[in-house]
Image (cartoon, helix red, strand yellow):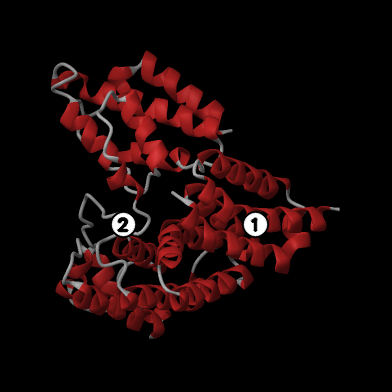
Amino acid sequence: GWLCRIGALRDLVKEYPKKIVTQPGSTHPGEWLRLKDGLVHSDPDVRHEVARLYALVCKAHLRTSGDAEAQVLGREAWVAALQDLPPKGNAQLRKLLKLPERSQQSDSSPKKARNPTVPWEVPRSLAEWAQCSQETLAALRAPGRGEEQAALTALRALGHAVIGEPGKHGGPPTEEAFAGICRAIQHVLGSEVGGDRGIFKCSVDLCHASVDKLAPFLSGLDINMGLGKAFPFLLERASSGSVKLAVASDKLVQQLAKHPKIGCEAVTKMVISAIGRADNAEMLTRPTMLLHTLLGEYGLRLCAQRDIITLLLCALGGQMERLQQQSEVDLVRPQLIGVLGTVNRFSQ
């Protein structure tokens, strides 16, 4: 499905560039940012073709900016907009855009916060729904070092609103508020303050309460779309944090898997996607353990679905291709063997 759609989009961009490029010279990808889901896909062919399309669209937008040298800053901005792109995908995209490679040290640190390059303009409607001032939530716009307490206060304000009487809140619809809460979690955990223990614990509690309290007013689609934004950042921080933080995230995963509007299938796919996005062996450990737990509890149900098994095998295969150092392979191999053994046992 991905390859067919990407091929069709490439043809459209090549044949109708003037209609596709609505803002010539734009240094922000806008709606084309949606392609980043393909850039972190478990299938390497999909990642390659999506990178080619993204580079093509970028060049089409910046063609009016002058020659290649004059377009460097614009191309850098397009790459920087992809905030959670793995180093290998980032390097591939930079090569297609003819940009110089960044230093390996700046890309490979497993505990480096993926700081959003564009501040988040917190919707005024979210403050209205939470019945708090806009200034309280303003700390979520671009939290930096030293602003942990302000960000924590903003998250707690959202938490109090969720725990209150969500059905009686004024302001925007509940689905819009839930999307805003998930965006807040994503933005804070992806910032410089995301590694703070209190921030992470509050984010997990907020996610837990939001699903528990707001689910009756939401569709399964709205819940899964919101979680799809926040969940990768929760898993990433859990992988690089302490054992207590990892345990808190594990409990959240178990709650989501049992929820009737989410289910073990959706959660398992999100965990597998996290495995496919992991930058190194250390970041693979926590999602692999979670996957093993999910398979142990819902193995018969999950292993009966071909799409989940295909996604799993592609993710594991892609990771084995990325791992180059023997120490990383030795660290991950026992976990991967355990997962594959569980899949084999339930598939027979």
Q: Quadrant of residue 30?
A: top left
Q: Quadrant of residue 97?
A: top left
Q: Nearer the viewer, residue 190 or 186?
A: 190
- Looking at the image, is mark 1 or mark 2 earlier in the sequence? 2
Residue 260 appearing in the image: no
Could you tell me which secondary element the residue under label 2 belongs to? loop
Q: Choose mark 1 or mark 2, whichever is in front.
A: 1
Residue pointed to by mark 1: 334
User: Is the residue marked by circle 2 packed among few (<14), some (14-19), or many (20+) residues within 10 Å?
Assistant: some
Residue pointed to by mark 2: 112
Are dots 1 and 2 in contact, CB under 8 Å?
no
- State how far apart marks 1 and 2 are (Cα): 26 Å
Horizontal relation, residue 242 to residue 28: left or right: right
Q: Position of residue 238 (x, y in %)?
A: 44, 67
Could you tell me which secondary element the residue under label 1 belongs to? helix
Residue 278 vs 18, above or below: the answer is below
Q: Residue at x 55, y 26 (%)?
A: 4
Residue 24 vs 139, above or below: the answer is above
Q: Position of residue 329 (x, y in %)?
A: 56, 48
Residue 59 appearing in the image: yes
Q: Residue furthest bottom?
A: 164
Q: Amino acid at mark 2?
A: Lys
Q: Residue at x 20, y 25 (%)?
A: 24
Quadrant location, the N terminus: top right
